[in-house]
Image (cartoon, rainbow, N blue to C red):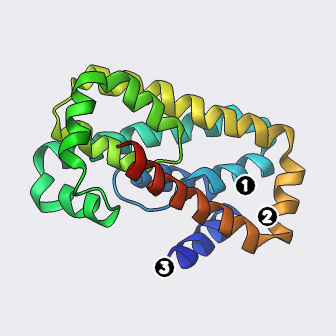
Amino acid sequence: MIEKLYDWMMRQAESKNAVWVLTLVSFVESSFFPLPPDPVLAIVVAKNQNKAIRYALLCALASVLGGFLGYYIGRAFFELIGARILSFYGQAENFKDAVETLNKWAFWIICAKGLTPIPYKVVTIASGFAQINLLTFTAASVITRTARFLVLSLICKKFGNYVLNFIEKHKTTALILIIASVIIGFLLIKLFV
């Protein structure tokens, strides 16, 4: 399934709909989608290097808005939807401990986890369930998601041609790197959440 999603994302990243796909993937990744928007952002920026900051900010905005959906799922629909999403990511067992820690250190945890390969949707759903102050959640989300996508965009702007050549020549390796980052995110969740 992940390979098919990845192939679809890569095809769309090279199409005329790339910016819409980037926005959509950034939005849904923050609440339920399994793959990060990073590969789409990398291709879109590499092909349009003069718009790197614009695409990073668009990606961050969509991610933060998607984070509100994740927050709402955790707050209003946890039993119906949120618990199933967390179970899919292997987080159902550790969830109560994670919520206790999140209640103590919300701003810093949201910032730290928003920069890592840990799936951001876990943080957004947990924040909603724990009823973290919405201003705290918003500030941490804006800071962390903007920083993450700006850094990636600036790297892709500087090395755009290398990024495109690497992805074209090594699609399998790129897919493995994406899957590895998702797996590392899951392992980090198991170890630190």
Q: Secondary structure at mark 2?
A: helix
Q: Earlier in the sequence, mark 2 or mark 1?
A: 1
Q: Earlier in the sequence, mark 2 or mark 3?
A: 3
Q: Is residue 15 visible?
A: no
Q: Is residue 191 visible?
A: yes
Query: Residue 157, image x and y in percent?
Result: 80, 39
Residue denoted by label 3: 1
Please determine whether, in this image, residue 56 is positioned above or below residue 180: above
Query: Residue 81, image x and y in percent?
Result: 18, 60
Instruction: State the residue at coordinates (22%, 48%).
Output: 95
Q: Earlier in the sequence, mark 3 or mark 1?
A: 3
Mark sitting on residue 43 = 1
Q: Nearer the viewer, residue 24 or 152?
A: 152
Q: Quadrant of the C terminus?
A: top left
Q: Secondary structure at mark 3?
A: loop
Label 2 packing within 10 angstroms: few (<14), some (14-19), many (20+) = some
Q: CA distance from mark 2 to mark 3?
A: 20 Å
Left/right of residue 164 with respect to residue 10 in the rendered view: right
State if disc 1 and disc 2 touch (CB < 8 Å): yes
Please determine whether, in this image, residue 81 is positioned above or below residue 159: below
Instruction: State the residue at coordinates (10%, 57%).
Output: 79
Quarter of the image where one finds residue 43: bottom right
Residue type for callout 3 = Met
Residue denoted by label 2: 167
Please determine whether, in this image, residue 71 is positioned above or below residue 119: above
Residue type for callout 2 = Ile
Q: Nearer the viewer, residue 93 or 137?
A: 93
Left/right of residue 71 with respect to residue 17 in the rendered view: left
